[in-house]
Image (cartoon, rainbow, N blue to C red):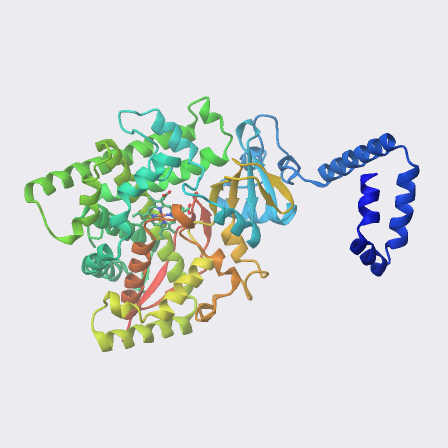
């Protein structure tokens, strides 16, 4: 009755209803209300509310409804990568994802052991939503096998390390370990050392050429560069990994162990996850590589600590190393683990990235010439490369950006959702594991025109397109790679110096492999002709 009164007494409202033509309908309703048993009406309203709620629930889609390969009880969907009865090859998981998205659409569910869902997404808006929602401590799922192993070795590790830790512990590590590594001052002071490392690399290329100017297995040289430069940056001293006639066995063993460890991580992640119950071959390999890396880097660290104490060197190359050694909040085990994580994170990533960028430049001679001219202009005006002169290398940086888009070493960025989130119409609870496939999104013509072509010019535009957000080879936000600035500097210096010395070409076509990272399949054979 109150409702009727409100309607009848509210003159303005009545006028409005008249005006909109709804007045007659409202009048009719009022009469119905007057005649109706009020209790019956309430029951009707309740029924209506329940009906609307059920319909809404029916239209809402839950994680279990996300399309994807058929999951087996307990084992989930990992069987699709099985060498016995699966569809996909572990070396080609990047192709498997392409196929999965093609079959199931922009959102695909996989399931790990105990049917824990992993949600794969590749559309721009969803990726942006996931990466931008992170709070103070963004959560990235740890590499389970590393976490499992490190927890079993309290003699060596007090926590899972910067790459795999979460929450407050991650924040403590990040704050204690990375400011020096990411600072502009460190990089500026490191540049002369980096130029010397690059000179050695150029000499190594020169000496490794056969009679046809071909360097066979060039990727191995790139990994040695990654090792030498990362170790120099982190440990503050030069090693001998770029010697032309002598391959340092320690360096080679470390590079092999890091490569092996990435592959073993992939095999444990994508293979049937029984390594948690039994010591499978993949898990045994993982332990063997992890121990080799630990032992080799331990020796390097102990020696570097000894030299630091004996000589008290004051040059700036030691900046990062000293900042790690002196971090007041950390245990010696944490410092060693941090150095291991930095070096392991730097070698293959840098090596692969250099192969990818050089490959794209080698296959596009007109672009190569443009970079060469740019570098010649810069160095003829200002002499050897400096931080300031590199600012003028605009085209070179556009080429790097375009290479990151077409061939990134890290093809996806992983996160754990912090809030309930709707993705592609599905409501996902906090705690869901999401793989954002930025690489596949970058190759989609919806996001980039002529998406499969190497067109550095697209990055010279003052107003970058909306999809440029997808080119994030170093990840996003607070968990972004702390090596980013160092790598970007090193790539510019190395590419500039290579192109100043050589005209490059590539024999055949590059093949890709998935080693947890995207990697060039061996062997990559580059041609380095002296510039006249
Ligand atoms: C081309 C070379 C490299 C690439 C493509 C690369 C890529 C990445 C990516 C994609 C992430 C994850 C970021 C995220 O989740 O948002 C990451 C994390 C990390 N990277 Fe790199 N990286 C490279 C080189 C390096 C180097 C040289 C170092 C060390 C000096 C390094 C140390 C780390 C560390 C410690 C993390 C974990 C950071 C954290 O969780 O807080 N990376 N990197």
Q: Which residue is found at the position 27% from the left and 66% from the top? A: 497
Q: Quadrant of the N terminus?
A: top right
- Residue 326, by quadrant, is top left
**Of the pair 523 and 278, the residue shown nearer to us:** 278
Relative height, residue 406 to residue 430 (above, below): below
Horizontal and vertical percent position of residue 102: 63, 49
Q: Is residue 358 left or right of residue 56?
A: left
Q: Is residue 251 left or right of residue 150?
A: left
Q: Is residue 304 left or right of residue 451?
A: left
Q: Is residue 239 left or right of residue 55?
A: left
Q: Which residue is found at the position 42% from the left and 28% from the top? A: 281
Q: Residue furthest left?
A: 310
Q: Quadrant of the C terminus?
A: bottom left
Horizontal and vertical percent position of residue 205: 27, 60
**Of the pair 377 and 416, the residue shown nearer to us:** 416
Q: Using the rendered image of the protein, determine whether residue 521 is visible from the camera's viewpoint.
A: no
Horizontal and vertical percent position of residue 519: 42, 49
Horizontal and vertical percent position of residue 413: 46, 46
Q: Which residue is found at the position 43% from the left and 26% from the top? A: 280
Q: Which residue is found at the position 90% from the left and 32% from the top? A: 37
**Of the pair 412 and 270, the residue shown nearer to us:** 412
Total residue callouts: 0
Relative height, residue 158 to residue 214 (above, below): above
**Of the pair 147 and 75, the residue shown nearer to us:** 147
């Amino acid at each position: 009755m109150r409702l009727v009164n409100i309607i009848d007494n509210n003159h303005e409202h009545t006028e409005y209803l008249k005006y909109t033509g709804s007045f007659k309908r409202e009048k009719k309703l009022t009469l119905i209300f007057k005649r109706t048993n009020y209790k019956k009406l309430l029951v009707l309203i309740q029924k209506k509310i329940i009906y609307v709620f059920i319909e809404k629930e029916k239209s809402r889609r839950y994680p279990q409804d996300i399309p994807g390969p058929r999951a087996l009880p307990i084992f989930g969907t990992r069987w699709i990568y099985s060498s016995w009865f699966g569809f996909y090859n572990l070396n080609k998981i990047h192709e498997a994802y392409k196929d999965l998205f093609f079959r199931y659409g922009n959102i695909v569910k996989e399931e790990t052991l105990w049917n824990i869902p992993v949600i794969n997404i590749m559309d721009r808006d969803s990726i942006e939503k996931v990466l931008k929602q992170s709070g103070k401590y963004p959560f990235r799922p740890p590499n389970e096998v590393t976490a499992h192993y490190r927890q079993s070795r309290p003699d060596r590790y007090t926590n899972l390390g910067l790459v795999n830790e979460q929450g407050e512990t991650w924040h403590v590590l990040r704050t204690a370990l990375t400011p020096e590594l990411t600072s502009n001052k460190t990089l500026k002071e490191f540049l002369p050392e980096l130029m010397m490392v690059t000179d050695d690399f150029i000499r190594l290329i020169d000496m490794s050429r056969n009679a046809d100017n071909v360097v066979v297995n060039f990727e191995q040289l790139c990994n040695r560069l990654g090792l030498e430069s990362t170790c120099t940056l982190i440990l503050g001293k030069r090693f001998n990994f770029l010697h032309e006639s002598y391959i340092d066995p320690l360096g080679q063993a470390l590079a092999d162990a890091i490569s092996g460890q990435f592959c073993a991580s992939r095999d444990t992640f994508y293979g049937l996850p029984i390594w948690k119950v039994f010591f499978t071959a993949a898990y045994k390999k993982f332990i063997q590589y992890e121990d080799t890396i630990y032992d080799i880097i331990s020796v390097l660290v102990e020696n570097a600590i000894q030299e630091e104490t004996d000589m008290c060197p004051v040059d700036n190359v030691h900046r990062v190393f000293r900042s790690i050694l002196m971090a007041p909040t950390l245990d010696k085990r944490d410092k060693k683990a941090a150095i291991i994580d930095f070096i392991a994170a730097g070698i293959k990533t840098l090596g692969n990235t250099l192969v990818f960028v050089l490959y794209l430049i080698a296959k596009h001679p007109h672009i190569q010439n443009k970079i060469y001219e740019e570098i010649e202009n810069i160095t003829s005006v200002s002499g050897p490369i400096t931080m300031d002169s590199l600012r003028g290398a605009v085209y070179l940086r556009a080429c790097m950006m375009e290479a990151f888009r077409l061939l990134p070493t890290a093809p996806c960025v992983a996160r754990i959702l912090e809030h309930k989130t709707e993705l592609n119409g599905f409501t996902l609870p906090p705690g869901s594991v999401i793989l954002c496939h930025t690489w596949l999104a970058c190759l989609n013509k919806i996001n980039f025109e002529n998406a499969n072509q190497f067109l550095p010019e697209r990055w010279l535009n003052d107003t970058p397109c909306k999809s440029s957000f997808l080119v994030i080879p170093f990840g996003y936000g607070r968990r972004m790679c702390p090596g980013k600035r160092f790598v970007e500097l090193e790539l510019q210096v190395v590419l500039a110096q290579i192109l100043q010395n050589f005209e490059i070409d590539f024999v055949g076509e590059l093949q890709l492999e998935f080693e947890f990272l995207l990697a060039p399949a061996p062997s990559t054979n580059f041609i380095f002709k002296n510039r006249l």
